[in-house]
């Protein structure tokens, strides 16, 4: 699609590799956020990467694949080119979802990692999440701060979602992507 060069790796590894480039965006103004838009159904297609376009022509492309694999690519997508995805016409559309519109024009002030809990053994999930039985935390997304506005770009298991707040039961950690903290997610089943 539009020249995209995916670069999937386990999220902790990807953040170690991309840390300096991501931190270099602090102080840069977000021009717009872009998503792949399915024309026939008039809706956002979250299996397509999201694109953050900054002043100076820097384009950050983010996509999650499976729970812990993150693709971070730079300036590979042609936002002016429509494309076909699974046999349906799509285009790139800015300011959707609403959280992108709220962040547009603001200066990036910080990064963090979001994590969600995982459980092992026989756990009853019929009521509230049993937070006293959390076995550990897995990396689930990126929290991108624009002063008092934030973007949560997170994994939906083969999809990339965006919201203006971390999801319920997620925690925000590893502020400014500290190298020592971004190495392990806490989940022994995830390679890092």
Image (cartoon, rainbow, N blue to C red):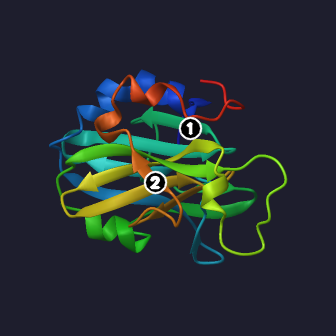
Badge 1 vs badge 2, beta-carbon distance below 8 Å: no
CA–CA distance between discs 1 and 2?
Answer: 18 Å
Q: Is residue 134 left or right of residue 154?
A: right
Which residue: 34% across, 42% down? 59
Q: Give residue 68's quadrant in the image.
A: top right
x and y percentages locating residue 174 in the rendered image: 37, 38
For label 2, the crowd category at 10 Å Cα-Cα, with few meaning under 14, some 14 to 19 and many 20 or more, is: some
Residue 126 at least partly seen:
yes
x and y percentages locating residue 31 in the rendered image: 24, 56
Residue that protrudes farthest toward the right in the picture: 122
Q: Secondary structure at mark 2?
A: strand
Camera-near label (1 vs 2) is 2
x and y percentages locating residue 32 in the rendered image: 30, 59
Front-lying residue, 4 or 50:
50
Quarter of the rendering occupied by the C terminus: top right
Q: Secondary structure at mark 1?
A: strand
User: Which residue is tagged 1?
Assistant: 70
Which residue: 52% across, 24% down? 13
Q: Is residue 180 above or below residue 77?
A: above
Q: Give residue 4's quadrant in the image.
A: top right
Which residue: 20% across, 64% down? 148
Quarter of the rendering occupied by the N terminus: top right
x and y percentages locating residue 105 in the rendered image: 19, 61
User: Which residue is tagged 2?
Assistant: 171
Q: Earlier in the sequence, mark 1 or mark 2?
A: 1
For label 1, the crowd category at 10 Å Cα-Cα, with few meaning under 14, some 14 to 19 and many 20 or more, is: many
């Amino acid at each position: 699609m539009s020249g995209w060069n995916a670069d999937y790796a386990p999220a902790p590894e990807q953040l170690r590799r991309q840390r300096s480039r991501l931190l270099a965006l602090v102080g840069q103004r977000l021009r717009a956020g872009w998503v792949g838009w399915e024309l026939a159904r008039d809706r956002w297609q979250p299996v397509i990467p999201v694109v953050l376009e900054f002043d100076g022509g820097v384009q950050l492309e983010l996509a999650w694949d499976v729970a812990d694999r993150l693709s971070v690519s730079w300036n590979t997508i042609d936002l002016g080119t429509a494309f076909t995805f699974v046999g349906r016409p799509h285009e790139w559309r800015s300011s959707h979802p609403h959280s992108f519109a709220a962040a547009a024009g603001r200066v990036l002030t910080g990064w963090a990692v979001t994590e969600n809990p995982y459980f092992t053994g026989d756990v009853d999930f019929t009521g509230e999440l049993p937070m006293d039985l959390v076995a550990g935390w897995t990396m689930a997304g990126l929290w991108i701060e624009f002063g008092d506005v934030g973007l949560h770009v997170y994994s939906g298991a083969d999809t990339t979602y965006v919201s203006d707040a971390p999801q319920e039961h997620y925690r925000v950690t590893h502020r400014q992507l500290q190298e020592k903290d971004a190495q392990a997610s806490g989940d022994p089943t995830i390679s890092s």
